Amino acid sequence: MDSIFNIRFPLILDYDNSSKIEFENDKGNDLNFNRGIYYLHGENGSGKTTFLNILALVTGTIGKKATGKGTVTFSGEAYNGKKFTYLRAADIREEYFCIFPQKAFFLPVSTRDNYIILNGSDKEKEHTLSSDEFPDLLSGGQQQRILMDILLDDSKPVWFLDEPLTNMDIERRHYFWKCMEKAINNGVNTIFFIDHWLGNTILMDKDFHHHATINASRYSFQKRKTTSPETQPIDIYENNTPEGFFSRQEQVVKREITVKRNRAL
């Protein structure tokens, strides 16, 4: 399946008539996302996570009003289509979208039961996880690895990764990049990244190219008056051959691990 997003701007998300955020493409046209990695680069609070959450169907009004104005279309199905409902949104999220690390463990519940609750889409994978292991009894690093095993699901073609490397130690970062490389080789189609760790790495990488700049404007309404918007840019970079990038990151972290171990001797 080709997992393709088309965004028709302006894309507006209203918050209970008290505020809104409006996304516009600086070139004024539609924006497409196809196969590859898309990295969103911008200041804290610029609206990157909100934009991803709209695409991932975890925020915004679903139905005829959708996200207020504009259109998000995934594989030919518009989020504001006449037949689009909350149930359809849940079906799409469940079948096609992996959102990490939005969820957290249920405690005290076994690793296997956490998988059933948080994902549970693959019976074969379910039986690789232990019913005798409890995440609340594991170290922080072990918990990170188990959470990746549970949530990073190769059967879902679109991954939304919001600050996935935050608080990861070297060993977990190495495991993360191995998961990324495995996923893209196993058929994961499109990966969206937000991560401050990756900023300079991606801007300097030969395989990433500037895809678009979207401007996010925040409005608030006070006593029927609209305040002047605060507008910030979000730059989007695209890599259509992500296998090499993931492999390079894995090798970089592998060298860091070697250096760390040599210093410990």
Image: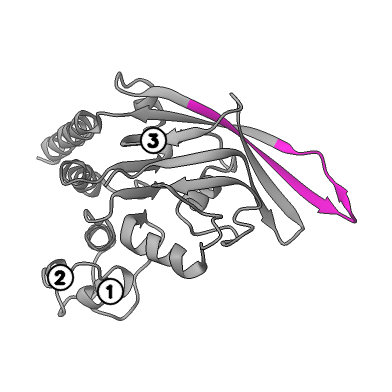
The quadrant in which the C terminus is found is top left
Q: Which residue is mark 3?
A: 38
Mark 3 vs mark 2: in front: 3
Q: Position of residue 119 (x, y in %)?
A: 29, 68
| Left or right of residue 138: residue 158 | right
Q: Are marks 1 and 2 in contact (CB under 8 Å)?
A: yes
Q: Which mark is residue 169?
A: none
Quadrant in which residue 132 is drawn: bottom left
Q: Position of residue 169 (x, y in %)?
A: 27, 48
Name the kind of residue labelled 2 in the image: Leu
Q: Position of residue 129 (x, y in %)?
A: 15, 70
| Left or right of residue 227: residue 70 | left
Q: Residue drawn 38% across and 49% down?
A: 160
Element class at badge 2:
loop
Q: Which residue is mark 1?
A: 114
Residue found at the far front of this picture: 82
- Lower position in the chain sequence, tag 3 or tag 2: 3
Magenta span: chief secondary structure = strand
- Residue 231, compared with residue 178, is above or below; it is above
**Which region shows up in magenta?**
212-230
Q: Residue drawn 26% across and 75% down?
A: 116
Q: Residue drawn 12% across and 73% down?
A: 127
Q: Which residue is mark 2?
A: 129
User: 265 or 194: nearer the eye?
Assistant: 194
> Does the magenta segment cover residue 40?
no
Q: Residue drawn 51% across and 63% down?
A: 83
